[in-house]
Image: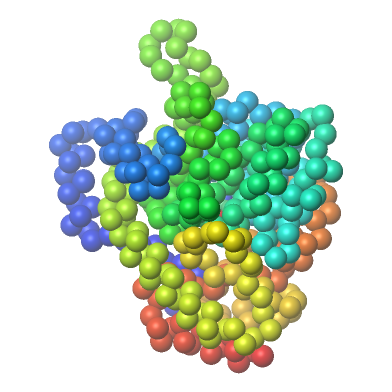
Amino acid sequence: MINVTKSFLPPLEEYNVYLKEIWKMNWLTNDGPFVRQLEEKLRDKLKTNRLFYVANGTSALRVSIKALELEGEIITTAFSYVATTTAIIAENCIPIFCDIDPETLTIDPEKIEELIGDKTSAILATHVYGNPCNIERIEKIAEQHNIKVIYDAAACFNVKYQSKSLYAYGDLSIASFHATKIFHTVEGGAIFCNTAGLEDKIDLYRAFGHRGEEAESYIYAGINAKNSEFHAAMGLCNLKYIDDVIAARQKITSFYDNELRQLPIKMPAIRGNTDSNYAYYPVIFSNEAKMHEVNKALEEEEIYPRRYFYPALNTLKYVRYASCPIAEEIAKKILCLPLYYDLAVEDQQRICRIISGCF
Ligand SMILES: *Cc1c(COP(=O)(O)O)cnc(C)c1O
């Protein structure tokens, strides 16, 4: 069976070294030494501003909304994973859905401005599959209207835009280190703080909004978004292999590119000046029926691509619907193909042969 992704696991002996250390220290969670070490190493590797390691990408989004004190309406993309929307709802804000650019699949800045009103406090946009949004236009709009920008950069590990980490853009950016992402800590995430002065707030909001023992030390209504020494240890192990993992994915991506080039299918356009991390291999078919046909042909061979992202978020039953025809159409006819570090060449060939056979 071949799934859309497979988590990288480091050699067990290497993880065991950390476990022994945890047993010795008897320090399991709450800003422990491995959490701090991981934060330091990530900052060093990615060359970013200060970052805060948290429990997952979703809580990173929630803590970001809290730290920026957002309220009212947040303009967000209709094409992302559901957590982008649910984090807004969980923080008592209203998601206002904006359609996407049909080529890059990121939020369409031309359509943001008409959605801005008195109640708008921020834009929460996703760098879709690690593909950067139109950062320059979004920044300008946010400045003109005095609203904040958060990037859901969940899948952007090691992506560079204009030679700088993609995490370094926006007032805040968030990452997910979930087991399905290219760099993972089993569960995990991070907030990259690009706004001086917010650091302490983020640090507090991720730990109940409380520091110290006095009655006055309960400062904010925070949440528990902390992560553990066990998770941080997995990150420290995986970090050593991430360059190899990305190189392997780059090779598979080139293979798919070559084999599938002749078919009447489309891949999202990558913005210029981007160093990709090959996190996904999305394919856009001409229509939903064709997508189903290919999906079925692969499933018959026990190969499971993923409908991702599906459905469009503006169509969720618990949100206020707003028409986003491009996102709705793309969500129906896009599939992510299997892509992981040790996907065998024969399997890559087989996948391409099955897909080609549908045309
Ligand atoms: C994975 C993902 C998330 C959620 O991250 P978790 O760590 O699973 O909470 C949010 N947004 C996008 C775009 C994602 O890909």
The image shows residue 273, relative to residue 43, as above or below, that is below
The image shows residue 80, relative to residue 220, as above or below, that is below
Q: Determine the residue positioned at 58% across, 40% down.
A: 170
Q: Determine the residue positioned at 16% across, 44% down.
A: 20
Q: Where is residue 29 in the image (x, y as percent from the top left)?
A: 32, 34
Q: Where is residue 118 in the image (x, y as percent from the top left)?
A: 82, 29
Residue 302 visible in the snapshot: no
Residue 245: which quarter of the image?
bottom left
Quadrant of image for the N terminus: bottom left
Q: Which colour scheme is used?
A: rainbow
Does residue 348 appear left or right of residue 323 in this picture? left
Q: Position of residue 87 (x, y in %)?
A: 62, 40
Residue 185 visible in the snapshot: yes
Does residue 309 appear left or right of residue 227 in this picture? right
Residue 33: which quarter of the image?
top left
Quadrant of image for the C terminus: bottom right
Q: Determine the residue positioned at 47% across, 87% down.
A: 349
Relative depth, front residue between 127 and 303: 127
Q: Position of residue 235 (x, y in %)?
A: 33, 49
Does residue 257 appear left or right of residue 227 in this picture? right
